[in-house]
Image (cartoon, coloured by chain):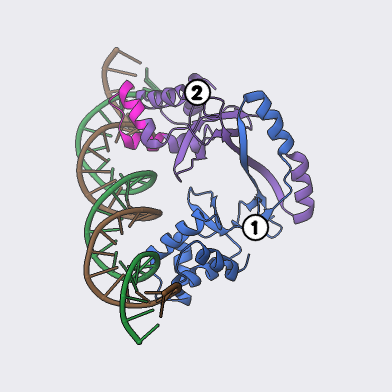
Chain colours: A blue, B purple, C green, D brown
Amino acid sequence: MRSDEIIRRLRRSGYKVTPQRVSIIKTLLGSREALTPAALFQKVRLVDPTVGEVTVYRTLNILSELGLVCVVSTAENVNGYIVRPGGHHDHLICSECGKVVDFRNCNVSELEKRLASETGFVIKEHRLDLYGLCPQCA
Amino acid sequence: MRSDEIIRRLRRSGYKVTPQRVSIIKTLLGSREALTPAALFQKVRLVDPTVGEVTVYRTLNILSELGLVCVVSTAENVNGYIVRPGGHHDHLICSECGKVVDFRNCNVSELEKRLASETGFVIKEHRLDLYGLCPQCA
DNA sequence: TGGTAATTGAAAAGGTTTTTCAGTAAGCTC
DNA sequence: GAGCTTACTGAAAAACCTTTTCAATTACCA
């Protein structure tokens, strides 16, 4: 997803496009790894010192509400945010360096069907995180 | 998993078995749903008023370290703890009432193989959470 | 170019989790 | 069992993380 797509979505949903929000979105897009609010704030402040930490939180909440970012739980019980690519996807996470790779076609629909009939649940969505070591850390 | 198994594991790892820890473990075992530290504290205090909130946190950290409980991220960005049944398992979570059902035989090993060869990752474990509505809430 | 309502940063407030500390108790040794 | 040692406890304080408040500012529509 590119920054102008995200910005368009923001505007379309009635939010104003401020320079602070643009800086935050671009910084988030520029990072391959999930960023905690604090880490994102540190990075943004280098590019645009006018951005306050509160605005980082507020912007992440908006992006999260709009489904434009998703939350990754890291090892230390801290939530990291990464930009969500279009459509459903899952994560492959390096336990060592924290790198996150998205993937699709996870194909758990068969499992969903089986569980639905066994438990009576109506299954709507899922989240699959695979943990391991990336090529660099392995 | 039964409370005496957990208690044995605690003792074997060099931790003392105190009445407070026993109360916390039994309360956690008695709940089918994941409990936040605060919710667990409320429940424990009914049974055993000598247990302080700090001890709940400390005990959860120990159980987590020993792999005896696992963390479930709930909708509101709050962490809930549930006792981990022996071996690997995944979760089926009701978005409405928060009920968590464990299941096994999730069979993502084929997917793991494919991703390993595509990305070069060494995959060690995974976590699969399915979200939907339980029979009561549907 | 105004006007208006949302947005901003800073400070304060609100929550959650951890640390500190003096007193207590589990569990080992005899 | 009794004594000893070391870990554990609750309460308060501290440390974090996140949200709310508020006056000033600014995006964006007409």
Three-letter amino acid code of the residue under disc 1 = Gly
User: Disc 2: which chain?
Assistant: B
Decide: is A55 above or below B49. Answer: below
Residue B93 lies, in percent from the top left, at 55, 34
Chain of residue at mark 1: A
Q: Which residues are magenta?
A: B41-59
Instruction: State the SS at label 2.
Output: helix
Percent across and percent down for residue D4 are 30, 29
Q: Amino acid at mark 2?
A: Arg
Measuring 75% from the left and 56% from the top, which residue is drawn there?
B119
Residue that appears at 46% across and 25% down: B31
Question: Quadrant location of the C terminus of chain B?
Answer: top right
Q: Quick one: C24 or B63, which is closer to the camera?
A: B63
Residue A62 percent coordinates (x, y) = 47, 58
Q: Which residue is mark 2?
A: B8
Q: Are marks 1 and 2 in contact (CB under 8 Å)?
A: no
Q: Give the SS element for disc 1.
A: loop
Give the CA distance from mark 1 to mark 2.
48 Å
Q: Does residue B44 belong to the magenta stretch?
A: yes
Which image quadrant: the N terminus of chain B?
A: top right
Question: As displayed, is residue A29 above or below residue B109?
Answer: below
Residue A119 lies in quadrant: top right
Q: Residue at x 37, y 63 (%)?
A: A54
Mark drawn on residue A86: 1
Percent coordinates x, y for residue B95 in the rendering:
52, 36
Q: Is residue B106 visible?
A: no
Residue A36 lies in magenta, yes or no?
no
Of residue C13 and residue B8, the one placed in the foreground of this image is C13
Q: Is residue B100 visible?
A: yes
Residue B28 picture quarter: top left
Q: Main secondary structure of the magenta part?
A: helix
Quadrant of res B57? top left
